[in-house]
Amino acid sequence: MNNWLIKTTIKNHTRTEEKKVRAAYGYLAGIAGIICNVALFIAKFITGTILNSISIVADSLNNISDAGSSVISIIGIRLAGKPADRKHPFGHGRLEYITSFVISFFILAAGAALLQSSVKRIFSRGTVGYSNISLLILAVSAFIKLWLSIFNKKIGKLIDSQILKSTAADAMNDFFITLATILSLLIIKFAGINIDGYIGAGVSIYIIISGLLLIKKALEPLIGEGVDKKILAEITDKVRSYDKIIGCHDLVIHSYGPSKNMASIHVEVPNNADIEEIHRIVDNIERDVYKETGIAMVIHTDPVAVESRELLEKKAAITAFVKKIEPEAEIHDFRCIRRSNSDNTGIIFDLVVPYSYWEDEKRKLVQSIKKETGRLYADCFCDIFVENGFVSDE
């Protein structure tokens, strides 16, 4: 059904990288959400009022809140799709994250209101009615919410939309809320125990926790996330596959929206290579990465003395020692210099360590490396710059 709906309503539905197609997906999901949630609100509100059930009435209010969220998602996707202008050269894609943040607050507000009403019901101990029709309405509601969650999740993945992913999570919350309400009615019917308020309270706490997690998810790209390990491997493998590229490091990716990413990376090249040839290779890498991933990349080149056997041997020895202490550590920008008026040689390099390292751990690691370097190369001094990588630990 989902595929049929997409194919019949969205022209060129496979071209999800195009802004118009992406917007059409967002509008489809938003309109489906509005229609379903308004219909569910009317049905549940009438049912809850007749049965005097706080959990059903609260559930209906949550549906009308979801309809409002769908309206906001449509507006957010439309604003995020605006092209770049003089004041916003990177486009308006981050508005999608902000919209997702707003929707998360709607979820929090719905959870807080439901918790307040549920606590009142626990202490008031009002009676709750039961009817087979109400049970049928709630069962249909649960099915619709499950479908909305699957539909929004599918589209959210297709167009990489945080708004729709948040909406999908909210719809799944509603599915469990409705199941809990059905359970409450069945217990009232067959056991004669009124747990309406307790069910409502439990569901509201679940909604609040879900809202907080969605807020965290919406804020992460705005604050700035580390590079995903899968993307890191994909890009670095791609870069290293080119001729004259010895290695690469310090990949940084900045997100300006789901379809607007910029990145920078350092690549190591032979110090004796022709500069024009290196420039051509770097240009090719930037173009190819953009074609394959949509990431606009800027590349910085680091020359490496490939003809110095002594330097390469020293780098290999120190790298092996460092990896023995800390397998996740990396060494780059390795070079040797000679001090003026001295026979001592300086070994200088950057050391990348995981974010879990404390300052004391960094100092101890540096001391161990310097001690081992002094043991292996008595005539050398060691200068190490320690930094954290830009890779996400998750």
Image: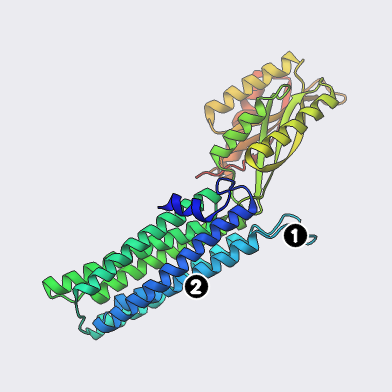
Taking the image as shown, residue 152 lies to the left or right of residue 362, namely left
Residue 327 rendering spot, x and y as whole percentages: 53, 30
Helix, strand or loop at mark 2: helix
Residue 203 rendering spot, x and y as whole percentages: 32, 68
Who's the residue at 73% across and 20% down the image?
379
> Looking at this view, is 35 or 111 the one in front?
35
Residue 181, visible in the rendered structure: no
Residue 383 rendering spot, x and y as whole percentages: 72, 32
| Mark 1 neighbour class, 10 Å CA radius: few under 14, some 14 to 19, many 20 or more | few
Residue 255 rendering spot, x and y as whole percentages: 64, 51
Disc 1 marks a residue whose amino acid type is: His
Who's the residue at 28% across and 70% down the image?
137
Disc 2 marks a residue whose amino acid type is: Gly
Image quadrant where residue 10 sits? bottom right
Q: Label 1: which residue?
A: 88
> Looking at this view, is 177 or 348 the one in front?
177
Distance CA(mark 1)–CA(mark 2)? 28 Å
Taking the image as shown, residue 333 lies to the left or right of residue 152, namely right
- Closer to the chain start, of discs 1 and 2, is 2
1 or 2: mark nearer the eye: 2
Q: Which mark is residue 68?
A: 2
Helix, strand or loop at mark 1: loop
Q: Is residue 22 above or below residue 127?
A: above
Taking the image as shown, residue 9 lies to the left or right of residue 93, namely left
Residue most extreme to the front = 8
